[in-house]
Image: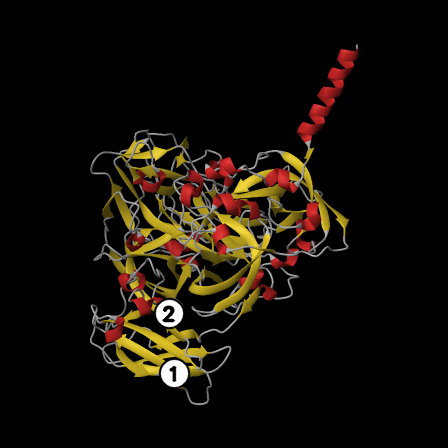
Amino acid sequence: MKKQLLSIVLVTLSFWAGAQTSVTIKEIQEVSITDLQNCNDSSAYIGQTITTVGYVIVPGNQINVTSGSVQGGFRPFAYIVDTANGGAMGNFSALEMMGAYVDGSGNTLPVNDLHDLKQGWMVRVKGKVGRYNGKTQLEPIDNSSITILDVNPVEIKPAKISVSTLNDKNSINQLSTAEAYEASFVELENLTVIGIDEFSGGTRVNLLCEDADGYLVKIADWFLVQKSKNFNTIRSGLGQSTGLFEVPSVGAKLEKVKGIVFHEPNGCFEGGSEHRSYHSGYTLNPFDTSHYEYSLTPPVIADLNRDPAVPTGTDNVAISATVTDNDGSVTEVNLFYTDNQSAASADFTKVQMTLKSGSTSEFTAEIPAFTDGSLIRFYLSAIDDDDNLIYSPQGASKDEDFHFYTVRDNGLSISDIQKVLNSDQNDASPYVGESVTVSGVVTSSTKDYDLGLFHIQDENETEWSGLRLTGNSSLIQYCRNQKIEVTGIIEESFGFTQMQVSEIKDLGEKVNIKPVLVEFTTENLEKYESVLVDFVNTGGKIVTSADPNSFGEFFVSTDPANDRDQSLMVQTGRVNATNASSLWVSLLSDTSYATEDGEVNVPVIAVQNGMSMDTLRGNLFYGFSQYKLLPRNNDDLIGFSETLDATNYPDCFVGIEKISKSNQFEVYPNPMEDKLHVKGIQHADFAIFNIQGQHVLSGKIEKEHIEINTSTLKRGVYLLRINAGSYEQSVKLIK
């Protein structure tokens, strides 16, 4: 009997422990030195639901992370430190909390309690231990998972460490010494800004810094404090509607800088499937303005402008910039230019820039007119009263990077917009922020059986010849092989060049454009960004890997072993705010994506090791530090080893006819809420597209009056397309 009772007690205790274990943050985070030396930094509690207690490090109002998969578009985060030793940092004492959970209906919801946490509060959290991009995360299981234990704040102090604890001189993570500080609040001293990365359309800023011994660390913008003035916040109650970060100049000296340590794996992780993209080792993420302490700094060159942006052979080009010095005065600003593509920076023509009338900081000078087709390189320099010298771009001092433009009497080509001089230094278009006009042939459209994204291509070029178009609902009426002229603003989105279209003109031509043939490679792909390409393996087949990553992507390679360093990423079957790819491709990394982000329209096949094809066709995309190919439909997997449903994109007519008077119909209410009625037409198809031209709903109209459920659509502007045989009509919708 005693043995039976003991067994019952043990089973009960075991069941209770399995359901929820109370552990310290250190127990969650600690990894042995041996494991770290073997490139393993994973928690022993991965996948388990636990309870832990900690002090809040970062106030909830400092975080502004967008998320297309979370209702409300915002994903909360918080950081806590173990209560042992008064909340001291380091020694595996801190942990990231990611505040999103899936409810019983499959909806991903924010953990709202994270929003209002204050620094120094003691909290108890129940959650599941997960992992993302090298970081261990605690994921609260719902909105009742956080209990505030004490609102009398303790002082949160940073640990003072050296950059060499985090990374080596190539910015490769020092796992054995740095992992103990993951998610901790730390302070670094005596850094110099050696590089500035303004990306995502100039709304985000990263600083690459170096200490006196040459060790490197990225100061990154995870928190609101380092968002630029062009960044718009996505949630209320933050006390500001935009970022406020004053971008320093290259050469600026940081006596001290504080922030949270993040792990962006590289080095021994670089070949792993979880970490296919290039990262920056351990990074520092400030969350308060007091975390930056500058000493003497060189001038800042900002707001560079050229007028006209697209000069003809008779135009002089006015170059202007705002030049300031935070700790003194600017003594000299110069412009250097050349049309000689082999000239070193020291041999450029020099012109001293002068202050504009009435200004104390805006300097200007002119580059004379050059003949049609000339490519003009130029750079600026500025000196302050402490003899600090700065260049724009900074790479000009080493002949590595220059500003440039092309003289065109008859307007730009796509390659003028896309081509860069040194993609290792800067892959942004020289026309970012400018309104330009260009023509091209449609290679992918938002029509059925197609990619759902819109690209055009220069029929006479191969490299630098593709461009994605967004932001104009009228794009949906155009088909592959139509030649169009578009006007719009050139923008950069996470290193990807695209046009926000304002005007479209049908040129009335049909061009059967051929994909650009590329021997399979994962190197030097920038020149094929947005280009329709055919990847081939002259030595055999292209093969797949069944080792997908968490965003619905899978890998292909010419090597049956699928060496990650020689593999290209492919994405299919997803349409959401941050990931978009075709819903007409059967091959998926995970069959759950068949209905998760849009509904795949063809029978699905899960990726398996060793599936093969002769040619892989698609438009090349770049985002989140990696290239990926986007096949448009099953026909782009040429010679595939499995039987696929043929999709055979139809031969579209050029021009859109209006629906005849006998087929006029009503659409109401507009603005709509959760229901939309279509009345007065039947035997037709309908499709709804968002303002980016992405397909979000579709179906058939078999009765004269149908009701469409639009409850899943977010607030915004949409386009309803009705297709009845050879006729097509579009209606603008508002929700």
Q: Nearer the viewer, residue 259 or 665?
A: 259
- Residue 547: image location, x then y, percent: 41, 34
**Up/down of 593 relative to 489, above or below:** above
Q: Residue furthest bottom?
A: 357
Residue 435, numbered circle: 2
| Quadrant position of residue 24 | top right
State the image quarter where residue 208 is shown. Answer: bottom left
Q: Taking 658 as reference, is 25 left or right?
A: right
Specify the quadrant that holds the N terminus: top right
- Residue 364 seen from this side: yes
Figure check: 387 above or below 507: below
Which quadrant does the C terminus fall into?
Answer: bottom right
Camera-side residue: 339 or 307?
339
Residue 364 image point, x, y percent = 37, 82
| Marks 2, 1: nearer the viewer | 1
Q: Nearer the viewer, residue 589 or 699?
A: 589
Q: Which residue is mark 1?
A: 332
Q: Looking at the image, how many numbered discs can be counted on the residues?
A: 2
Amino acid, disc 2: Ser
The residue at the point 39 percent across, 78 percent down is: 382
